[in-house]
Amino acid sequence: MGDALPVVVIGAGPQGLAAAAHLTERGMPFVVLESGSAPAAAVSEWAHVRLFSDWSELIDAAAARLLVAAGWTAPSPGQPTGSQWISDYLAPLAAALADRVRCGQRVVGVSRWGRDRLVDAGRGDRPFTVHVQPMEGDEYRILARAVIDASGTWASPNPAGADGLPALGERGAAGWLSYRIPDVGSPSGFERTHTVVVGSGHSAVTAVLALAELARRDSATTVTWALRRANAANAFGGGDADELPARGALGIRAKEYVDAGLVSLVTGFRTERVAADGEGRVLIAEDGRRLSADRVVVLTGFRPDLSFLSELRLQLDPVLQAPARIAAEVDPNVHSCGSVAATGAADLAHPEPGFYIVGAKSYGRAPTFLALTGYEQVRSVVAELAGDHEAARRVELLLPDTGVCGGAGPFDAPDGSIGGTCCLPAAPLLSLTTITPDRS
């Protein structure tokens, strides 16, 4: 029964669809289960955002071969928006895979058929059982020879609370807190308001830039950027040293806006409470500082949803919740390089044979995941499942450097110093002017 069963791919995003393309080339039966109503449902939620990767870094090789055979023409070079990524690549790819991509099918559990997590006897010889709850109808199950979890982390954003839990009052502030990069097309609801952006990654920088453009056109629109760290050394990225120029340009522009006073920068602000009181809507830090806001955009990263994998035997890093073998490569406490090693099937394997977590979810809570990383992962994983162990071991990817190198450094270091455990000795990266917000 084993080889006749399908490989179940969870998620019809970029990595899930790429996995399907590789499975197609290998002649292996599979089904892709997507919880959203259409393929690339998560990408559609940030369709207005322009990627910093070029088209050449956003298209999987096997997917391209499949599409070209169907008459597809690759897009011209450039950085697409999320909407263009869907219309010009992901949607055609899903269409080429036809009915093997099933939408509106949420995976609610994965286990071994007839074996719970405790049972050793015959475990590796049993197929996986994948329990699925469709948007309409009753729960059902699929028996699978292997499972590739490419479900991503988009549905599990981190909270504003600095301790990893929602800040006091955060759950009740849904009306004026958002966990998505804002679409500032007119009208957006951000005009003539004061917005606080919480977070320091590329998503936060992108949001700050979009809101700063509004502020430049209208002085009644104001923006505050709240960072948890005591300094902003890494918040602006690698600039001209970034091997993805569009990514480096984000940080350069953000620093220009801060220096010009279009964005007020607040450091060491760790949110403890979210409140709406007589002074209006406010964020209150652990040290008592207050930031008033009409709107708050929380972009503090994402975390993996492991709830439906509780019956599987996983080997996860206790800090990042990523596969243990890759954790040291991507841990921001150790370094912030983009030039980490590519990860393949051997790095992603768990004590549960035939189960792999790929894509952004494979990085757990770590940031800086690139589509290229996921495409290399699924190429290697599918080769391993097909028995082509040599191809699975082969590395076919060199990741572009971010231009930021070194450990994340002491969390409360006020001088901008970074650690020296990665590539360079400890050194300050950028000098900048911290601007006190007008409304605090």
Image: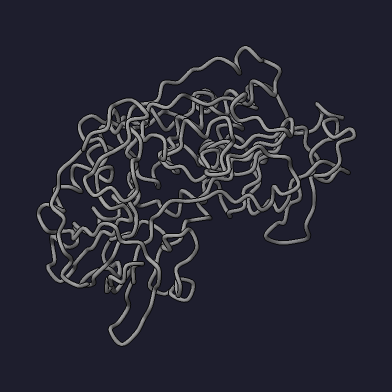
Query: Within the image, what quadrant is residue 26 found in?
Result: top right
Task: Tell me: 79 left or right of 251.
Answer: right
Who's the residue at 21% across and 45% down the image?
415
Render colour scheme: one colour
Which residue lies most toward the left here?
A: 260
Who's the residue at 67% across and 15% down the image?
388
The image position of residue 18, as x and y in percent, is 55, 32
Quarter holding the C terminus is bottom left
Q: Nearer the viewer, residue 287 or 207?
A: 287
Query: Within the image, what quadrant is residue 297 found in?
Result: bottom left
Who's the residue at 33% across and 41% down the image?
409
Task: Tell me: 128 left or right of 98.
Answer: right
Which residue lies most toward the bottom here?
A: 278
The image position of residue 184, as x and y in percent, is 28, 61
Task: Tell me: 156 left or right of 258.
Answer: right
The image position of residue 62, as x and y in percent, is 54, 24
Who's the residue at 27% across and 32% down the image?
426
Q: Nearer the viewer, residue 118 or 212?
A: 118
Q: Nearer the viewer, residue 35 or 362?
A: 362
Quarter holding the N terminus is top right
Q: How many marks?
A: 0
Task: Tell me: 7 left or right of 346.
Answer: right
